[in-house]
Amino acid sequence: MKKTTWLLIVFSICFFGCKKNVQNSVADVEIAKKPNIIFLFADDQSYKAVRALGNKEIKTPTMDSFAENGTTFNHAYNMGGWNGAICLASRAMIMSGRSLWRAQEISKEYRNKKETDKTWSKLMESAGYETYMSGKWHISAKADTIFNHVGHVLRGMPFDTPEGYNRPKSKTDTIWQPWKKEFGGYWKGGKHWSELVKDDAVSFLDSAATKEKPFFMYVAFNAPHDPRQAPKKYVDMYPLDKVALPDSHLPEYPYAEEMGAGKKLRDERLAPFPRTEYAVKVNRQEYYAITTHLDDQLAQIVATLKKNNQLDNTYIFYTADHGLSVGEHGLMGKQNMYDHSIRVPLMVVGPDIPKGKKVEADVYLQDVMASVLEIAGIEKPDYVEFHSLMEFARGDRTKSNYNSIYGAYEKGSQRMIRKDGFKLIVYPKIEKIRLYNLNKDPQELNDIAENPANSEKIKSLFSDLIVLQKQMGDKLDIQSIFDKL
């Protein structure tokens, strides 16, 4: 081989090799410039359980700071669920990007180890993010197969005991106390689960501070889901004489059995029937206590970000998988279509997010997934049905991406549409319709479906609901009920 030919080969190898290394270095630098993203996920937290959102009884300084230092979405909703575990459906939707019934189908694929490469975490990993998860999972895909790093993987709810149900029957019924560790629950293992998840998150943040790669954290707390346990000092923050009875309090909800939330449903067995004022107040006291305890764990995560100089380059999303009744409308659980159970807190804080901004457009909490993809510079895949919130947060958009909000529980128990300031709820099994004017009646106290003046509004909403069902892949046929109108 001639000397010139040999030199040319060597030069080519060096040139293209160096070029490739330069390209790789540039790509690494571009990845390193990407912002960090933390998704903080509560369980069973209604939008009513945040002081900054209007409840002056509860103490939530960290959640309040998210609202003060970022943008709040005042009308964020979960679609519902296909069974009593509403959290399962909510989490499947946010991880897959699919709406309710399609998320149910994709969950079956996850069990067979299929389609997991299309999950939220895998999409983030493909964009160069170090992915991390700790806390409640409740999704059929295995956490350690779709995240780079996994802390504790906690079950759908803490282990409970019989003593936590049907209580309190009276003021002398004091067997159960939230701080008693012998009942297990959040105390099983020795450390409260909220503290366990917080410790995991803090440890990962400290580790990530030594690396250049951006991170995506999925931090999911079980709180304030029952059993609502917290250290005694948190319960003492809420004397019963300072805990108000909700305006919608009823001894029992008149259609509970027919809508699939009757006396045999686990959530509804937490308090005695009928719902006494005392029992409701005690349950709300414990709900507030575990929420404030959760807030303190969030504070330590934020403090760690500040300590590590990570906060200025980090987006924080805070929300919950759905709300909870805790005595409203005579109900205890979340298996209903009232706002206290489908509407959640949703705040975002970040480098270019306006402070103290409030967005009134209707959104779904699962829009967080599409928002994070946008921040990460990932083109939203066609199968992701939800929309980014970033245009709203940055002030570029005010009109909702959705003409109406859809809600459903189980295959045949409840359907709902929320549109133009009205909410129509349908209980198909008994062909019962409820209508609320949300502008005049935000607490949903007055069902106006029987008023003849509202017949056209009912027909219009019902017709829109049927169209919405088709869009959502909802196979429940409610046409016959509509025809009777």
Image: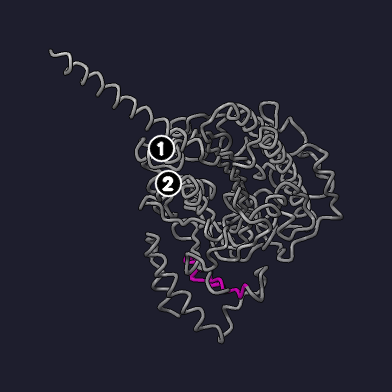
- Nearer to the camera, 340 or 265: 340
Q: Where does the image place residue 282, in percent across and percent down from the top left? A: 78, 50
Q: Are marks 1 and 2 in contact (CB under 8 Å)?
A: yes
The reply to whether the magenta stretch includes residue 429 is: yes
- Which quadrant: the N terminus? top left
**Label 2 Cα neighbours within 10 Å, binned few <14 / some 14-19 / many ≥20:** some
Q: Where does the image place residue 332, in percent across and percent down from the top left? A: 66, 54
176 displayed left or right of 135: right
The secondary structure that dominates the magenta segment is strand
Pointer 2 residue? 378
**Residue that appears at 78% across and 50% down:** 59
Q: Where does the image place residue 106, in percent across and percent down from the top left? A: 38, 46
- Which quadrant: the C terminus? bottom left
Label 1, label 2: how far apart the Cα atoms are: 9 Å
Q: Residue 431 carries which label?
A: none
Q: Is residue 416 visible?
A: no
- Nearer to the camera, 347 or 391: 391
Q: In this view, does 428 lie above or below 221?
A: below
Secondary structure found at label 2: loop
Secondary structure found at label 1: helix
Q: Where does the image place residue 368, in percent across and percent down from the top left? A: 52, 51
Q: Is residue 159 above or below residue 268?
A: above
Q: Give the range drawn in magenta.
A: 422-438
Q: Is residue 120 above or below residue 73?
A: above
